[in-house]
Image: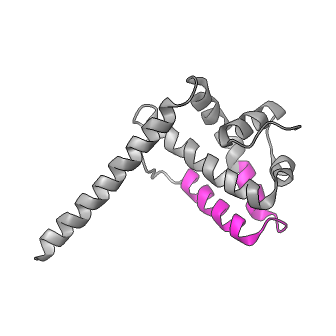
Amino acid sequence: MTWWQTLLGTLGGLLLLWLLLVALLWWAARKQPDGTTLRDALRLVPDVVRLVRRLVADPTVPRGVRIWLAVLLVYLLSPIDLIPDFIPVLGYADDAIIVAVVLRFATKHAGLAALDKHWPGTPQGLRALRTLAGLGNGPV
């Protein structure tokens, strides 16, 4: 096997994995009951960035959680995405899904109280974030 066959095989595998990810994100976006949830998620981005920054700076949050949150913060602030934002629905859905997964992880390990304590937005925004992340809508 030559080097270019190895390279083509590797690139083909990466392309296949990327297409699988796009299909999964498309499927997850279609499962949403209406289009407002994605729109709500986009409105929450500035507050989510501030929330993640505050959680990363909080020494009471476990170190592993802070590392994952720092990676999320870099991802959110980076112009490079898994799926470019100019692709309708999926471009922003990947960001929303990644935020939801990381916030679920962070909440599981740091507690819902840490999320509530550091939330910089409105109570309605916090309820929307909890809903999007599948964290439940307890008292805010």
In the displayed structure, 99 sits above or below 131; it is: below
Image quarter where the C terminus lies is top right
Can residue 103 be seen by looking at this rendering? yes
Residue 125 screen position, x and y as percent: 76, 34
Q: Per the image, is 100 magenta?
A: no
Can residue 53 be seen by looking at this rendering? no
Image quarter where the N terminus lies is bottom left
Residues drawn in magenta: 50-77
Residue 106 screen position, x and y as percent: 72, 57
Kindly identify the residue that appears in the image at 77 percent across and 56 percent down: 54
Residue 72 screen position, x and y as percent: 60, 57
Kindly identify the residue that appears in the image at 42 percent across and 31 percent down: 88
In the image, taking residue 37 as reference, residue 111 lies left or right, namely: right
Q: Per the image, is 60 magenta?
A: yes
Kindly identify the residue that appears in the image at 20 percent across and 69 percent down: 7
Residue 44 screen position, x and y as percent: 67, 37
In the displayed structure, 6 sits above or below 43; it is: below
Kindly identify the residue that appears in the image at 56 percent across and 49 percent down: 98
Query: In the image shown, does 3 or 84 lie closer to the viewer?
Result: 3
Structure colour scheme = one colour
In the image, taking residue 80 as reference, residue 8 lies left or right, namely: left
Dominant SS of magenta comes to: helix
Query: In the image shown, does 128 or 59 lie closer to the viewer?
Result: 128
Name which quarter of the figure residue 55 lies in: bottom right
